[in-house]
């Protein structure tokens, strides 16, 4: 379980394909604190640490993960948002995030508000993919509050700290991002669909 509060930016150092799996070598400022078999969210996708060497560690993504996330677009040198799982007893500053990416979205507009930025994302509408104004959404692992909400798109506002300390500063029109919708909203949508069916 995660909170959507990014700890650090990691850098993709190596990409190796093995049959349908992809091994990513990532460097990070907290690699020395990691352990084998630990869960780390990468752009919101929970991956397991399988090897550690110096300031670099390796995670493996299976085909299912590659198909449902933006991991397949990663290139050497790309920066990814990193978060280790929450510890019981810690404050949760974001919201409850599972690290299970629901789908991807495309950035369709970036609005500079002279001190903050508003990003608009479009995704394929589907049952359970629900946003509401002032509700929670996870974009590339970042816990955010929805500003504008429509059936297949939404916007979020980004403050300078988030802009600088996550990979939002690299987003432009056309950038593909990972989305995890609020778990409560997904349960409510599922319940309503079963009740109507």
Image: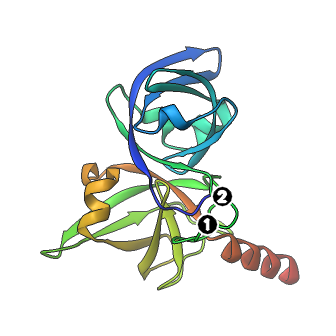
Tell me if label 2 and label 1 are in contact, CB under 8 Å. Answer: yes
Up the image or down, 31 lies above or below 116; here it is above
Which of 104/197 is in front?
Answer: 104
110 horizontally vs 91: left or right = left
Residue drawn at 46 percent across, 53 percent down: 140
Residue drawn at 40 percent across, 29 percent down: 12
Up the image or down, 136 lies above or below 108; here it is below
From the top left corner, tell me how far across and down residue 51 is, in percent.
60, 22
Residue 87, numbered circle: 2
User: Which secondary structure lies at badge 1?
Assistant: loop
The quadrant where residue 60 appears: top right
Give the class, few, some or many, for how many residues have Cα within 10 Å of label 1's Cα (few <14, many ≥20): few
Up the image or down, 97 lies above or below 175; here it is below
Which of 153/168 is in front?
Answer: 168
User: Which secondary structure lies at badge 2?
Assistant: loop
Residue carrying label 1: 90
From the top left corner, tell me how far across and down residue 101 is, in percent.
60, 52
Q: Quadrant of the C terminus?
A: bottom right
Residue 107, numbered circle: none
Up the image or down, 107 lies above or below 148; here it is above
The quadrant where residue 126 appears: bottom right
10 horizontally vs 92: left or right = left
Q: CA distance from mark 2 to mark 1?
A: 6 Å
From the top left corner, tell me how far across and down residue 43 is, in percent.
48, 48
Which of 65/144 is in front?
Answer: 144
190 horizontally vs 126: left or right = right
From the top left corner, tell me how far across and down residue 1 is, in percent.
67, 57
Number of on-image labels: 2
Give the class, few, some or many, for how many residues have Cα within 10 Å of label 2's Cα (few <14, many ≥20): few
């Amino acid at each position: 379980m995660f909170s959507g509060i990014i700890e650090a930016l990691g850098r993709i150092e190596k990409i190796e394909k093995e049959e349908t799996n992809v091994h990513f070598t990532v460097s990070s400022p907290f690699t020395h604190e990691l352990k084998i078999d630990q869960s780390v969210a990468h752009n919101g996708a929970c991956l397991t640490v399988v090897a550690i060497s110096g300031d670099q560690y390796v995670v493996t993504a299976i085909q299912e993960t590659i198909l449902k996330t933006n991991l397949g677009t990663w290139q050497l040198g790309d920066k990814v948002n990193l978060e280790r799982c929450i510890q019981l007893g810690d404050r949760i500053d974001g919201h409850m995030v599972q690290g299970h990416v629901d789908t991807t979205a495309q950035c369709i507009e970036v609005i500079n508000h002279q001190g903050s930025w508003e990003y608009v994302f479009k995704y394929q509408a589907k049952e359970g993919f629900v946003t509401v104004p002032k509700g929670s959404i996870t974009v590339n692992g970042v816990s955010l509050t929805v500003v504008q909400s429509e059936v297949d798109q939404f916007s979020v506002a980004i403050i300078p700290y988030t802009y600088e300390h996550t990979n939002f500063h690299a987003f432009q029109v056309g950038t593909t991002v990972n989305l995890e919708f609020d778990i409560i909203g997904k349960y409510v949508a599922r319940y309503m669909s079963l009740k109507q069916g």
